[in-house]
Amino acid sequence: MRILYGVVGEGMGHATRSKTSLEWLLSQGHHVKVVVSNRAYGFLDKAFTASFPRTDEAREGQGAIDVIEIRGLIMRYVEGAFDEAGSVVKNVLRVPGLLAENVGAYYDDVVRWRPQCVISDFDSFAYLFAKVHGLPILSIDNQQIIQRCEIPDAAKDEDLGSFRATKAFVKAKLPGCDRYVITSFFFPEIRDKYRDKTILVPPILRKAILDAKPVPVAEAKHYLVYQTSTSDSSLIPTLESLSDQRFIVYGLNRDERIGNCTLKPFSETGFVHDLATSRGVLSNGGYSLLGEAVSLHRPVFSVPVRNQYEQLLNAWYVRELGYGAYEERIEAEPLRAFVHRTPEFAEKVAMFRHDANQRLFQALRETLDEFETRAFHDDVRRKG
């Protein structure tokens, strides 16, 4: 099929998960045009453009891909917290220019290419293209869980205002898709009115994670720390206060040793190895790393970014399922308690079972078969 695939460019989680779906689509011989913004464009362009033919060069049944850069929205953070008001103002000011630039970037080209369906990983531009041209749409992301599933009252009450705002945003983002695939490490009930069009699948794992060889938590020698805020001056002293533990720290863009902390620059190979051989993971509430940690049976100490309900919900489920701890900040006493309870958390998280993306691939196969049948009948009607 000819598939228009939209990937939201804010953060890298959507891009890394979409890469796995795109690899499967190409292995099945589909032709794909990817529209993506920000850092995610460079990541996907590097992953695919040199390795696969372009869509106008490939023969039928040969996987082909074009990665097209568009301009995307920007999330603003202030002192480690999501700045909702600042992000709204900044993006509202950019919208007129974004629309004009994106029409020039890909709209005419995609119209002439005549895609048969759209897949959106929380991307609005491909979604809107599908709506304008009457194409079927498959949504793949983790955010839809907030809108389409039954969220426990206790989780809502952690920050009811943020829950309501996030739910309203997610509901308005990609309404009326033909199918929704939600990727998650926790599995609440799907709301009755959405059951027919929604499926939950385990975390979408990149090949490096699937190929990792985790050691038993009891034999591990260090904790992995992922910190995205370079302005947090209390992190290293807090970790140093647990002098009998060893920490490997990523995200600070430094390469040095400070007491019991080893700071490393990012390397996918190194990061995956350190994750798979860790006693546990200290991170924010971002879905990608939490999903990888749970899938590799690593206990989690989660400190969600303030004002980000999605991260709060992930951390709440980490605690609720017994996979680890949910705290508002990294401090010595809660961290000592987490270290003490690591064997208990490890026993719980070891019960999680991943399926090597097989439910995702099955959902893709069934949905695209349905879309292809619909496209065939539409072509027959047009020719008739």
Image (tube, rainbow, N blue to C red):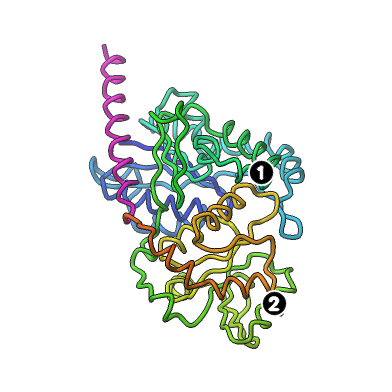
Instruction: Count up the numbered dots.
Output: 2
Q: Residue at x 50, y 35 (%)?
A: 148
Q: Is residue 379 magenta?
A: yes
What is the number of the mark on residue 273? none
Residue 39 in view in this figure: no
Indicate left or right for 75 with 61 as reference.
right
Q: Give the main secondary structure, helix, strand or loop, of the magenta stretch.
A: helix
Amino acid under disc 1: Asp
Location of the N terminus by quadrant is top left
Residue 223 in view in this figure: yes
Q: Residue tagged by mark 1?
A: 157
Residue 24 horizontal/vertical position (percent)? 31, 50
Location of the C terminus by quadrant is top left
Indicate left or right for 359 with 220 as reference.
left
Amino acid under disc 2: Thr
Relative height, residue 330 to residue 116 (above, below) = below
Q: Residue tagged by mark 2?
A: 238
Residue 247 horizontal/vertical position (percent)? 57, 79
Q: Disc 1 versus disc 2: distance between alpha carbons?
A: 29 Å
The magenta span reads: 356-384
Secondary structure found at label 2: helix
Q: Return the disc, 1 or 2, that comes first in the chain's sequence.
A: 1
